C-alpha cells in the first residue's frame, strides 16, 4: 500500500520531473523488492522505465546519497545515471533502470556466482576502498576515530545496541553482544577508507558483464574490515566459512596489496548481526521469501560459529 505522500508525489512532482527532463509521460508504477530502508519503485513512462527512490519525510537523507553518486561519477566509478533529484520534501531520486536486476537476483536464478562475477564484485570494492576520500569528501569529521583507535569499533556496537532496542531483541542477542563488548577495545583502526556500508549482491546492479554498486545511504569513512567482512560473507552463503579466506586472497589480488586483516571476526559479527536484525524485522512483519529465510539462518549460523554464542531468534 502506498502512502499519501507517495500518491502526492506521483500526481504532482514526479509527473513534472518526467516532463522537465524529457523522460516521457507517467504511465504506472510498482514497488520493487529490497529497499529495506528506502522504498524503491519501478516507474513506467511512455519512453522507458526508471527507478524511483522515495524518501518521504522520515527516511535517510537523500542529499547524502545524491552527493555520493555525484562524487563517484566525477572520478569515473560506476554509478547509475541520476535523472533527477528532488531536494524539497517529500524527497526522491529518479535513477537509471537496469532490466537484468541485481547480482543477487542473477545468483538466485542460476544458483551460483561465476568466476567473472566474483572478480568484478571484489574489484569494484577494492577501487571504492582505494578512493582518495579526503579529496572527495574534505569536510568529513573523523575526530571521534582519531581520539582513540578503537572508537570506530565502539561506534559499531552503539549502532547495534540502538537497533536491538528498536527491534526489541535484547534477550535474543545478549550473549553475542557480550562477546562484542568484550572484544571491541582490541580492534585498532589504522588507515581509514571510504566504506560502502552495505556492500552485498542485492546492492549490485548488473548489465551483461558490468556491475554497478548502489544504495550508499550507509556510506562512511572508517575501518576497511567492516566493509570487507560483510561483503565477503554475502557471497559465501551456503558455503563453508573457510571459503572467505579464498575471497580475501582474491581481494588482495585486485587491490595489489597484502592486507593481513587481523581480528576480522569482530567486524564480521557486527555486520552480520546488523543484517540478521533487519531480516528478522522483515520476516516478522509478514514478508514471505524462502531465499531470504535461508540467508537469515545461514547468517545466524555464521555468527554462532564465530562467537561460540547462541542467537535466540525465532520467527514466530
Image: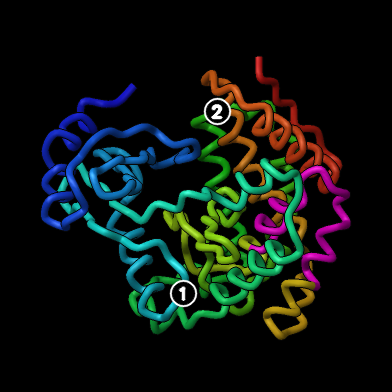
Which quadrant, please, contains the N terminus?
A: top left
Q: Label 2, label 1: how many angstroms apart (C-alpha)?
A: 33 Å
Query: In this orientation, which residue lies closer to the viewer: 25 or 36?
Result: 25
Quarter of the image holding residue 273?
Answer: top right
| Residues drawn in magenta | 228-249
- Asked whether 270 falls inside the magenta stretch, the response is no
- Which disc is residue 199 wearing? none
Tell me if mark 2 has few (under 14), some (14-19) or many (20+) residues whose alpha carbon lies within 10 angstroms of its own.
some
The vertical placement of 115 against 24, above or below, is below
- Residue 70 on image: x %, y %: 33, 70
Determine the residue positioned at 37% across, 66% down: 68
Q: In x, y percent, where is residue 95?
A: 33, 54
Q: Residue lying at the far top in this picture: please name it.
A: 316
N-term-proximal mark, 2 vs 1: 1
Identify the element where label 2 is drawn.
Answer: helix
Q: Nearer the viewer, residue 276 or 85?
A: 85
**Is residue 235 covered in magenta?**
yes
Residue shown at the point (84%, 48%) measured from the top left: 239
Q: Residues within 10 Å of mark 1 (few under 14, many from 20)?
A: some
Horizontal side, residue 96 vs residue 259: left or right: left
Residue 150 found in image quarter: bottom right
Q: Is residue 72 left or right of residue 8?
A: right
Does residue 209 appear anywhere in the picture? yes
Q: Residue placed at 55% from the left, 26% from the top?
A: 168
What residue is shown with label 2? 281
Helix, strand or loop under label 1: loop
- Residue under label 1: 77
Q: Main secondary structure of the magenta part?
A: helix
Say above or below: 8 vs 108: above
Amino acid at each position: 500500500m502506498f502512502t499519501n505522500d507517495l500518491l502526492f508525489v506521483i500526481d504532482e512532482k514526479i509527473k513534472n520531473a518526467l516532463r522537465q527532463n524529457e523522460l516521457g509521460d507517467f504511465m504506472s508504477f510498482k514497488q520493487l523488492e529490497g529497499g529495506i530502508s528506502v522504498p524503491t519503485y519501478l516507474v513506467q513512462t511512455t519512453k522507458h522505465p526508471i527507478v524511483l527512490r522515495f524518501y518521504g519525510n522520515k527516511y535517510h537523507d537523500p542529499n547524502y546519497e545524491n552527493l555520493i553518486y555525484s562524487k563517484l561519477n566525477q572520478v569515473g566509478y560506476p554509478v547509475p545515471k541520476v535523472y533527477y533529484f528532488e531536494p524539497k520534501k517529500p524527497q526522491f531520486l529518479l535513477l537509471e533502470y537496469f532490466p537484468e536486476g541485481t547480482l543477487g537476483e542473477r545468483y538466485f536464478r542460476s544458483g551460483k556466482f561465476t568466476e567473472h562475477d566474483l572478480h568484478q564484485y571484489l574489484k569494484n570494492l577494492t577501487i571504492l576502498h582505494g578512493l582518495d576520500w579526503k579529496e572527495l569528501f574534505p569536510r568529513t569529521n573523523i575526530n571521534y576515530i582519531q581520539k582513540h583507535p578503537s572508537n570506530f569499533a565502539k561506534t559499531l556496537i552503539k549502532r547495534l545496541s540502538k537497533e536491538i532496542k528498536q527491534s526489541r531483541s535484547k534477550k535474543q542477542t545478549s550473549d553475542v553482544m557480550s562477546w562484542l563488548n568484550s572484544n571491541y577495545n582490541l580492534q585498532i583502526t589504522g588507515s581509514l577508507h571510504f566504506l560502502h556500508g552495505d556492500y552485498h549482491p542485492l546492492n549490485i546492479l548488473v548489465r551483461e558483464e558490468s556491475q554497478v554498486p548502489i544504495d550508499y545511504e550507509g556510506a562512511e569513512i572508517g575501518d576497511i574490515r567492516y566493509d570487507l567482512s560483510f561483503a565477503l560473507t554475502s557471497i559465501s552463503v551456503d558455503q563453508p566459512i573457510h571459503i572467505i579466506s579464498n575471497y580475501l586472497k582474491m581481494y588482495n589480488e585486485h587491490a595489489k596489496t597484502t592486507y593481513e586483516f587481523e581480528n576480522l571476526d569482530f567486524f564480521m559479527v557486527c555486520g552480520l548481526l546488523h543484517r540478521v536484525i533487519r531480516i528478522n524485522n522483515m520476516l516478522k512483519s509478514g514478508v514471505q521469501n524462502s531465499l531470504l529465510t535461508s540467508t537469515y539462518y545461514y547468517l545466524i549460523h555464521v555468527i554462532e560459529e564465530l562467537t561460540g554464542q547462541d542467537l535466540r531468534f525465532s520467527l514466530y
